[in-house]
Amino acid sequence: MSEGRLTICATPIGNLGDVSERLRETLCAADIIYAEDTRRTSKLLAHLGCRTKLRSLFTGNETARTQELVREATKGSHVVLVSDAGMPVVSDPGAEAVRQAREAGVIVSAVPGPSAVTTAFALSGFGGDRFVFEGFLPRKGNTRKRRIESIAGEERPVVLFASPRRLGDDLADLAKKLSPDREVVITRELTKMHEEIWVGSLAGAASEWSGDVKGEVTLVLGPGTAGVVTLSSAIEEAAALVKSGVSRSDAARQVSDDSGVGRRSIYQGLLENQDES
């Protein structure tokens, strides 16, 4: 019996001309391919002339299909894992498959290729030796709030994925809690016919991209300033002063003087917090 293995394959993020010869050979020679979206991968296989067996592995069935994938590999099959586009496991299912396959003694390797993360970062022009990848912002609640807070003082450029349905909300929240002047590069439909690259401020982006958007979107935020005080944290600090007996106006003025955040914005935030309580 041949030794089983799992190969993680990066697939084109848009332009099928980015398929490498190694990717073509790997997909066509595999015993079975597990794909996040079998319909999308079927089109890729048809383009390449491959007739490899195809199975789905997405968030909804990841646990069961991961076990199946590992069984196939331990029996000696060459199993391939792909996502909709780009490198699997990066903000996509597959991490558990990699871990379990390795624990089972399966050889795990990768065929590198296109990536929206590195492509968008290169196009941003921010440069430098480091950047941060944050994936998709949480949809709501304190988890979303804490994530945006952590981004506010990040000294490195930050790469984010954005759903076209939530892009407007993401930009509005980022502009509200970060500096509205912070530079952002928005890339849409990378490598495709209608590729678009927009450069401007967060405030400008929130206005420009507030409507319906189609296609895949990746954002790159310019580096922030270490130790920056965001509006939300300034409001929280002022609220603590109010709780200790300081008037709202005095609390807003004191925190504004210490942080540089606008007094009126802090005061308005205190009033909104009172209305919500």
Image (cartoon, helix red, strand yellow):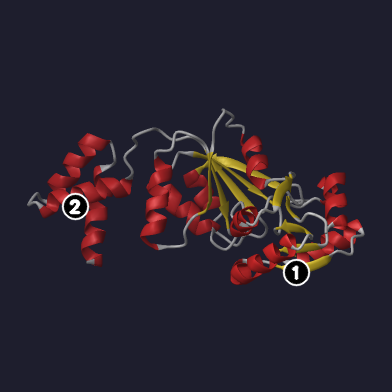
Query: Helix, strand, or loop for circle 2?
Result: helix
* Residue 218 position in % (x across, y down): 61, 49
Q: Amino acid at mark 2?
A: Ala
Quarter of the image with the N terminus is bottom right
Mark 1 surroundings: few (<14), some (14-19) or many (≥20) residues within 10 A: some
* 149 to the left or right of 32: left
* Residue 263 position in % (x across, y down): 24, 43
Residue at image mark 1: 55
Q: CA distance from mark 1 to mark 2?
A: 54 Å
Give the number of the mark in front: 1 or 2. Answer: 1
* Above or below for 129 versus 99: above
Q: Amino acid at mark 1?
A: Arg
Quarter of the image with the C terminus is bottom left
Residue extending furthest front?
1
Q: Residue at image x 73%, y 60%?
A: 73
Residue at image mark 2: 239
* Above or below for 172 versus 224: below
* Above or below for 117 versus 172: above
Mark 2 surroundings: few (<14), some (14-19) or many (≥20) residues within 10 A: many
* Residue 13 position in % (x across, y down): 73, 51
Sequence-wise, which precedes: disc 1 or disc 2?
Answer: 1
Q: Residue at image x 86%, y 64%?
A: 52
* 1 to the left or right of 96: right
